Amino acid sequence: MEPVYITVIGAARVLFAAQGLKFRIRGAENVPRTGGAVFAINHTGYMDFTYAGLAARPAGRLVRFMAKESIWRNKVAGPLMRGMKHIPVDREAGATSFRAAVDALKAGEIVGVFPEATISRSFELKDFKSGTVRMAQAAGVPVLPVTIWGSQRVWTKGHPKRMGRTNVPIFITIGEPIAVGKGSAAAEEANALLRERMTAQLHADQDAYPQLPPSERHFLPARLGGTAPTLEEANALDEDEVRRRRGAAPA
């Protein structure tokens, strides 16, 4: 039994209904009903993990998400994260969280990972960290490409949250599983294939998504005529943010 997780899911569904969110989930049949798997998810908004978790529910599965360790120190969120058996990530000690994720996968869990490691301000896919496919490789489980489009309209980096009744459509697509062979070359190949598949899924969802009003062009990538920063501009903003966080002056 998962009393904490099931209760949180119930509360989330009530919130989503109050917001009028309209979910379109495709590829739910690709989620295995048993056994371990990695959910590799693109990252455009702060609510992505809650939306991606819904995609596993038709298969009767729960997702254990990897998230920054600081959340566990929060008096409210910390107990919930522990109760839902999510996996804390300490960026200064990544090996520990990697081992915890591999152990969970070997135990038959689905582990949710954001290969970009941070929200993409451009709403395009950033470069992928290799840890996603390496943990799947180490555990001997497949990687599922999962894309979300529309979540940036609810709450994303650099823009006010919109948690009221917005009636925003949220598109979620789960692609066919990708097996990762043995060796570093196989991991690199799988990582490239994962990004290729997720790019195709994301572009297809963007093409099918209802047209945004002119007042929301900042939620569209520049490639689609929006005013979001380009990938290069967004990367520069991320680098500046890291330098400020570390207390170093820009070069």
Image: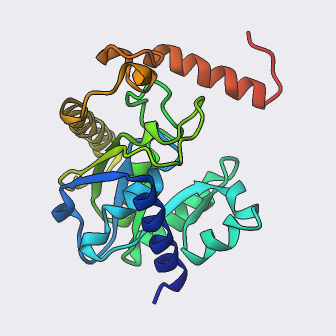
Lateral position of residue 237 relative to residue 148, left or right: right
Q: Is residue 234 left or right of residue 112?
A: right
Residue 13, image quadrant: bottom left
Instruction: Note whether 83 is above or below 148 in the view shown.
Output: below
Q: Is residue 1 visible?
A: yes
- Looking at this view, is 99 or 199 the one in front? 199
Which quarter of the rendering shows the N terminus? Answer: bottom left
Image coords of residue 43 (percent x, y): 44, 41
Q: Is residue 124 above or below residue 118?
A: above
**Residue positioned most to the bottom:** 1
- Where's residue 134, x and y in %? 40, 52
Relative to 123, residue 176 above or below:
below
Query: Does the rendering let one see residue 112?
Result: no
Q: In which quadrant of the rendered view does residue 88 lie?
A: bottom right
Labels in figure, total: 0
Residue visible at 32% across and 27% down?
A: 212
In this view, which residue lies farthest toward the top? 251
The colour scheme is rainbow
The quadrant in which the C terminus is found is: top right
In the image, what residue occupies the spot 60% across and 20% down? 237
> Which percent across, then down, holds residue 76?
72, 67
Give the residue at the far right of this rendering: 247
Residue under the image location 43 percent in, 27 percent down: 219
Percent from the top left, x then y, of residue 58? 25, 71
Give whichever of 178, 64 is nearer the camera. 64
